[in-house]
Image (cartoon, coloured by chain):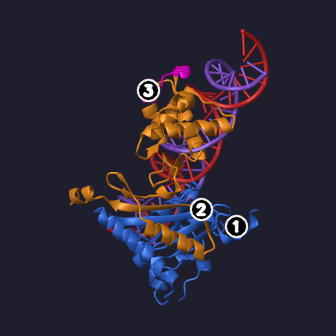
Chain colours: A blue, B orange, C purple, D red
Amino acid sequence: MIFKLSMLSSHARECSTAANRSAGNTILSQLLTQFENYLAGRGLRLTGQRQLIAATFFTITDHVSTEELYRSVQAKMPSIGYVTVYRTLKLLAEAGLASEKNFKDGFARFEKAGRKNDHHDHLICTACNRIIEFRNPRIESLQDEVAQEHGFLVADHNLEIYGLCSHCRKSIN
Amino acid sequence: MIFKLSMLSSHARECSTAANRSAGNTILSQLLTQFENYLAGRGLRLTGQRQLIAATFFTITDHVSTEELYRSVQAKMPSIGYVTVYRTLKLLAEAGLASEKNFKDGFARFEKAGRKNDHHDHLICTACNRIIEFRNPRIESLQDEVAQEHGFLVADHNLEIYGLCSHCRKSIN
DNA sequence: CAACTTATTGAAAATGAATTTCAATTTCTT
DNA sequence: AAGAAATTGAAATTCATTTTCAATAAGTTG
């Protein structure tokens, strides 16, 4: 049985669970299973809200703010509160399934996180707020070198390049 | 006449100005002169508070938060308000003499800024909050390369490496 | 299946840094 | 020295985030 977003309704009992999703093998269902395992392992509960929020989050490819995810989720479940989205994002981050980014625009953004080897960084257009991801292993390894030189044990890193994207460069005199 | 911080008092008229500081040639006096020029060029006024705040800021080597600078300044001029420090830091940033950094701890920090060629990045210890600066031209040029590949016009960039400093590594089991 | 314990939810309130407002004061010009 | 305009500092406001709490829901146990 393939998991579908449209199945998520306010009737929590009808929602997919790890059990009835096991036949499917999409990335989405894998991520949801990971989340469920995280919750189960801590005695936390799997609710319809959490399922919907997590599924919506995993479906979004970009970086979302709490506000954006909240609006997206609310379209499907109007009763849901901002705070629940906020709390679920924190849970996802604790579970290692989301990572928080703080760009200069003053509010937190989250992106899917996971695999150590998929680290990427960001080009951020200060005119149109577009965020472009890039990967550069050479920069990564230089960072590790620098850290080693200082006896530093790296947990995470963050590289943001601010400027004008190719599109905005042209439209500005 | 050498400029001294201790000369700054609440009597603005007695404070050093570009004119009577011109004989001295310290970096501090150069920076203050730049700030004064910036103010003059915009019809803004040179006040005792601004002089004191700027001078104190230029004297601090580290990254300061508005709060920290406020406390530092208040020790010399108790009547000064937080808002004035906040506003002066913004002015200094506009003048290109300070640059704002937003690390993950939730409040803005400022550091002396200026010379394009002195760009540096930060190793940030998540245990003791120590901030270590480093310079790595190879990382810089790789960043520029990446930006070029995306047709991006770089205005600024920001590299933070979070982890444990050599000291904290040892003290944690 | 029903009762129970405990987690979760959502609204509202609280927090905290950043920012604005405004009357009093100070600066700088004339 | 007087006037126009900028600045100051206290208080109020904003805005994202975080906490509180009573009502509700989840999952467990008998």
Residue A101's disc is none
Q: Give the labeled residue for mark 3.
A: B76
Can you give x and y, in whole percent of width and height, for residue A54 in the image?
Answer: 52, 71
Q: Is residue A66 left or right of residue B56?
A: right
Q: Nearer the viewer, residue C16 or B141?
A: B141
Q: Nearer the viewer, mark 2 or mark 1?
A: 1
Q: Nearer the viewer, residue A143 or B16?
A: B16
Q: Residue at x 54, y 29 (%)?
A: B49
State how far apart marks 1 and 3 are (Cα).
46 Å
In this rendering, the answer to whether A120 lies above or below C8 is below
Q: Mark 2: few, some, or many residues within 10 Å (few <14, many ≥20)?
A: some
Q: Secondary structure at mark 1?
A: helix
Residue bounds of the magenta highlight = B2-14
Residue A80's disc is 2
State how far apart marks 3 and 2 are (Cα).
52 Å
Quadrant where the image shows the C terminus of chain A: bottom right
Can you give x and y, in whole percent of width and height, for residue D14 in the image?
Answer: 65, 44
